[in-house]
Amino acid sequence: MKTLIVYFSYAGNTALAAEHLKAALNAETLELKLSNEKKRTKPGKFFWAMSLMFSKKAMLKPYNVDINAYDLVVLGTPVWGGHPSPVIAAFLNQTKFHGKKIALLCCHASGPGKVFDEFTTLLPENTIIGKIDLHSPSKMQVTELKQKIEEWVKLLC
């Protein structure tokens, strides 16, 4: 099964999970980047994230991907205020697809919130075959993270 992992990572947790998932699924990855992305201090990151969350207008760097070339698309996002990041939402608004098998990944510090419900709304003509939420992957032992991902992958395949 040809697989693409599309993800956005704010603090590195989703990127870490995506890299382990890439190895487990022998998948390709597309890391979404913002067109106005720049280095920010910790307080600056917080205010930038809040402004992005409330404006809901994430401007993505150009990407070149043909979703139709993949059998399975994994979407990965950090949880922002109980919701998927505006970056992954922008991707879904720009890249319309249907009839795909979709797996959902979210990383959080306090729970998945409404992420999976909102993904379901954003992906109406697709089949969601699996969901996983990971609590602070960067704080987990590598073996524990790999094991959770490998167990999830067995359910997907």
Image: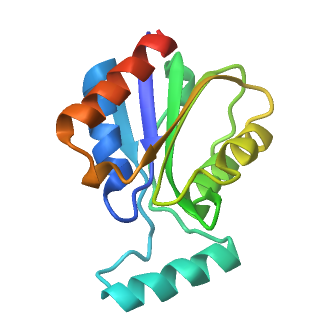
Q: Is residue 2 left or right of residue 101?
A: left
Residue at x 50% of width, y 20% of height: 69
**Residue situated in front as seen by the camera: 27 or 45:** 45
* Residue 30 can be seen in this image: yes
- Give how far across and how far down residue 43 sits, in percent: 39, 90
Quarter location, residue 146: top left
Using residue 43 as the reference point, say whether residue 60 is left or right of it: right
Residue 66 point in image, percent of width and height:
51, 31
Note whether residue 27 is visible: no
Q: Residue at x 46, y 60 (%)?
A: 109
The residue positioned farthest toward the left in the image shown: 142
Q: Nearer the viewer, residue 131 or 143?
A: 143
125 versus 95 height, above or below: above
Q: Give how far across and how far down residue 124 sits, in percent.
A: 80, 33
Q: Position of residue 22 (x, y in %)?
A: 30, 29
Seen at 44% across and 61% down, the residue is 61
Answer above or below: position of 34 versus 98: below
Which quadrant holds the N terminus? top left
For the point 27% across and 38% down, the residue is 19
